[in-house]
Image: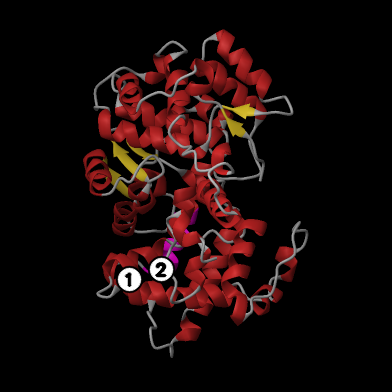
Amino acid sequence: MRMSTYATFESMHGRKSTIEELIALLRPFSRESVLYLCFVIGALLKMWDPDESPDSDYALLVRSIFERQRADRFCFSARTNDQEFVFHRRQILFIAKLAVQHCSAIGLDVLRNPPGIFGTICLMANDHFHFGLTAGNNLTLGVLDRDRIARVLAEFVVVQEYGGIYAVHNTARFHRLYRLHVPALNLHPQYVDIASKFRDITGIELSDFQAIAFGLFARCANVDREALQANAWVALVRPENFLTTALSPELIQKFLEEVSMTSDEARYAITQRDTGANDFTAFRNKPMIREPNGLLAVDIAFLLDKQASGPFWRVNLRADRPETAYGFFGEPCLSITSMNSFRLHQKQLEGLPYSIPPIRKTTQRKYAICFCFRTGLWSLPSSNLVCSARRPSTAETMRHW
């Protein structure tokens, strides 16, 4: 994973922008045009992949949204040792969320707008992700080393979470988990038959859902500059795109209802839960927005998540006792991260830059968090690997690691 910093409005103008200023700049544009541009930026820069970021496409996008002087500055910065980038995944998700909340169906086309305003929107959005938990005055305040580490983790957990997904590892891991590890635990006192419950809730077989979701991910992930230049509508997904498959129209309709929502539904979902600039729960649940011209993927990596952890969360949210489903899922997760599981996939793991530590009962939490940060192979929070644990959300709870 490549580490770098992002450019902000504050660093350029000496003051942090307000959320009201950001919304005021974004509101005149039509919602569909903003979501379309967000998808194009994510697709061209391959934001779901932690190892790829096409330099030529980055320069093209920068020059498309900034006036010449600022574009030259950011293009030059991207080629230096002290890189400063304009775009990142959380920023694009945040702009999409604000567009759903505050942009109407009728408005200016952001793609036809002169360079400058959307560039400023991107910089302003970047002002709202850093929280100052790692401020340099911690030493003078007498903060303990343990607390300083917790503060760093609180900042970097979300950075790591949105750093991208290794699609091959993610797909293989969850396919194996649902197919082998969950059924093998059918005698567990908290056993949940995820495949059966998922079918009862959605009317879709789990294997079919995973196959279609991965196909949709591949369809969106393969949108590149050449494809867009040949047909700008390739960025949108329509039901007729599935006509060449052997799937029934009824199955496709059920699937699209599971992964997409209208703008009104998205706005309501965000209103129900919005804890700040890093909260994209609504898009995790349904990563596509239905617009008049077709479906737009808000985030391509979230599409991949739908065939991975998505079925579990769908079952968990409908369970009579969610804590039971949540607790049980830690068992197959822990099982699949053991050395015995990985020995079966030794060829897949060849060439990894880090060794994988064995998971021991006495230290399973510590090894799990080490595994999460060192290899990038496990995308779920390490607390999910322990049945009695709960997802940490603050620096305070991180101390117990």
- As helix, strand or loop, the secondary structure at mark 2 comes to helix
Instruction: Find residue 206 and name its label.
Output: 2
Is residue 337 in view? yes
Task: Name above or below for residue 344 compared with residue 30.
Answer: below
Question: How many angstroms separate mark 1 from mark 2 (CA)?
Answer: 7 Å
Amino acid type assigned to the residue bearing label 2 in the image: Leu
* Number of other residues with Cα within 10 Å of mark 1, as a class: few under 14, some 14 to 19, many 20 or more: some
Q: Nearer the viewer, residue 273 or 390?
A: 390
Q: Nearer the viewer, residue 237 or 335?
A: 335
Occupied quadrant, residue 54? top right
Residue drawn at (62%, 15%), measured in percent from left and top? 73
Q: Is residue 69 left or right of residue 245?
A: right
Q: Nearer the viewer, residue 340 or 254?
A: 340
- Asked whether the residues under the numbered discs 1 and 2 touch, taking CB atoms below 8 Å apart as contact, a structural biologist would say yes
**Which percent across, then down, holds residue 104?**
24, 27
**Which percent across, then down, holds residue 368?**
59, 68
Residue drawn at (25%, 47%), measured in percent from left and top? 269
Amino acid type assigned to the residue bearing label 1 in the image: Arg
**Which percent across, then down, holds residue 235?**
44, 34
Q: Is residue 368 left or right of residue 358?
A: left
Instruction: Find residue 199 and name its label.
Output: 1
Q: Which residues are magenta?
A: 205-214
- Decide whether the magenta segment is chiefly helix, strand or loop: helix
* Colour basis: secondary structure
**Which percent across, then down, holds residue 340?**
67, 79
